[in-house]
Image (spheres, rainbow, N blue to C red):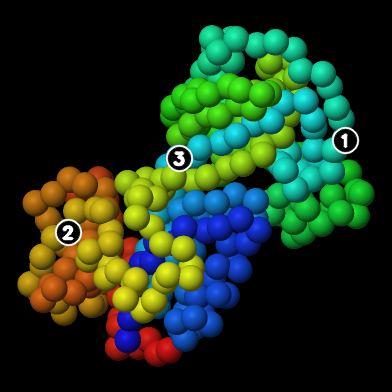
Amino acid sequence: MRHGIIFVRKEKDMTSYDVIRSLKHKLGIRKIGHAGTLDPFATGLLIIGVNEGTKVLPYLENESKEYIAQLTLGEMRDTYDVTGKVIKKKKVKKHTFEEINQALHSFVGVIKQTPPIYSAIKVKGKPLYQYARENKEVQLKTREQTIYDVRLMAYEKHKIYFYVKCNKGTYIRSLGVDLAKKLGEVGYLSNLERIAIGPYKIANVKKIKDISLNSIIDLKDALKITKITYQKEKEIKNGAPIKLNCTDDLVLIINKNKALALYELNKADMLYYCKRGFHYENISD
């Protein structure tokens, strides 16, 4: 029985669920999930949880994200990306590297974003993209997001290449469109690659065709959080609060070379409480 994490390099023209469906068929495992959705046109790092590994996905999903984006000026598309219909065209003015860099850096910090109408956010139980396909207007609420860092990488032939590090839920498509507006232009995201989720980087990550059962990394090896060996395994299995000589918010409790549970620190009483216990014997393919 395999439990753990797979790091996958998602390719273009696939949904995140397409990746899950392919891996279920390829590996013969039913219980698989992912942390952090990628749009079909986007590529890059997707973290997959297998069996008990699915229990850590909510924590990985909350990690910061890093992307390399390509913004094309001169056209506006209804989806804010390369897959959409052209709804506006405008001749591109001349811009210097310094001007674009200054505009890009104005987004660092807490910003307000309006989600693209073609997105999976639900309004009254229905995804926004369904309203868009039905040509129905929806009042979109702005959301606060945090941009931790940006970097202008290149500007050539009306294409802006930039790096961004942001919090969960940030729409890079919206960021690209807002950057174009700040420059007095229209634009759409023509390429997007996720290169990191928290401490997990895309380097050496395999495509689906190269994934096998051997690609599943055990939780104790995959998770980049503090690992603490705790001998009283019965206490952990019962989810008992424990006292540790540690101040990290989240730790992985292990014993006998096996991950037992995720524990989270309660700063009110400085005790660690079980958030997710792993019960390998109860899982079957």
Q: Residues within 10 Å of mark 3 (few under 14, many from 20)?
A: many
* Residue tagged 3: 66
Q: Earlier in the sequence, mark 3 or mark 1?
A: 3
For residue 21, what is the image quadrant?
bottom right
Find residue 227 and name its label: 2
Vertical comparison of 9 with 185: above or below? below
Mark 3 and mark 2: Cα distance apart in space: 25 Å
- For the point 49% across and 32% down, the residue is 164
- Kindly check if marks 3 and 2 are in contact, taking CB atoms under 8 A apart as contact: no
Residue 76 point in image, percent of width and height = 80, 32
Find residue 87 and name its label: 1
Q: Amino acid at mark 1?
A: Ile
Q: Amino acid at mark 3?
A: Glu
- Kindly check if marks 1 and 2 are in contact, taking CB atoms under 8 A apart as contact: no
- For the point 23% across and 56% down, the residue is 251
For residue 180, what is the image quadrant?
top right
